[in-house]
Image: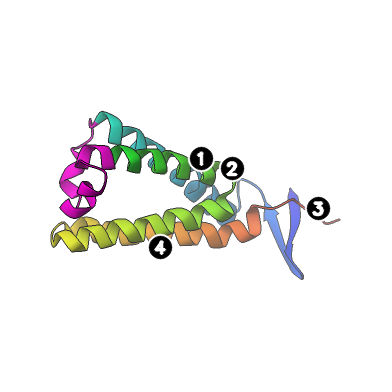
Amino acid sequence: MKTQVAAPGVLIHETAHEPAYQAYQILHWGFVIAPIIAGCDKFLMKLTDWTQYLWAPLGNIFGSARTFMEIVGAIEIVAGLIVAFKPKVGAYIVAAWMVGIIVNLLLLQSYYDIALRDLGLCLAAIALGRLSAYFDHPRTVAQ
């Protein structure tokens, strides 16, 4: 069993059997995989037509909703990669991104159910950021 000092006076046992570490791993890899898949699909449009969720004035910024979604897709892929390598930073980027998506859906005055789901994802990303404070740093092994 690996023990680390997470903060002065706080020891964390980092094993596959520890619930806090398991929660961190689930959130960490979930927020790597989901944004990358969603980002790739912004180019492929196989899961859904993502442009239906876009407030029209935003789509016009880059000429078309499709172009806007491809830019969004690239950003989501990058966000997933940041979470993979720097979850302490990437988690908060994803949380902020989710807030932007929620605002977009509220501007549409539709898809409130998806906005509520995205609020849950935003909170989960914040939880990942908080857990990263303990698990995403150089390990100090206690004796």
Q: Earlier in the sequence, mark 3 or mark 1?
A: 1
Farthest residue, direction left: 110
Numbered label attached to residue 85:
2
Question: Is 99 or 114 nearer to us in this picture?
Answer: 99
Hey, which quadrant is residue 68 in on the image?
top left
C-alpha distance separating marks 1 and 2: 6 Å
Residue underneath mark 3: 141
Q: What element carries label 1?
A: helix
Mark 3, other Cα within 10 Å: few <14 / some 14–19 / many ≥20 = few
Residue underneath mark 4: 123
**Place of residue 41 in the rendered image (x, y in percent of width and height, measured from the top left):** 30, 33
Residue underneath mark 1: 81
Q: What element carries label 3?
A: loop
Nearer the viewer's eye, disc 4 or disc 2? 2
Residue at x-position 53% and y-position 59%: 129
Farthest residue, direction right: 143
Q: In this view, does 7 lie above or below 59?
A: below
**Left or right: where does residue 56 sit relative to residue 85?**
left
Circles 4 and 1: CB distance less than 8 Å?
Answer: no
**Place of residue 128 in the rendered image (x, y in percent of width and height, measured from the top left):** 51, 56
- The C terminus sits in image quarter: bottom right
Q: In this view, does 51 lie above or below 20?
A: above
Circles 3 and 1: CB distance less than 8 Å?
Answer: no
User: How many labels were placed on the picture?
Assistant: 4
Q: Which of marks 4 and 1 is nearer the N terminus?
A: 1
Question: Is 71 or 38 nearer to us in this picture?
Answer: 71
Residue at x-position 35% and y-position 56%: 98
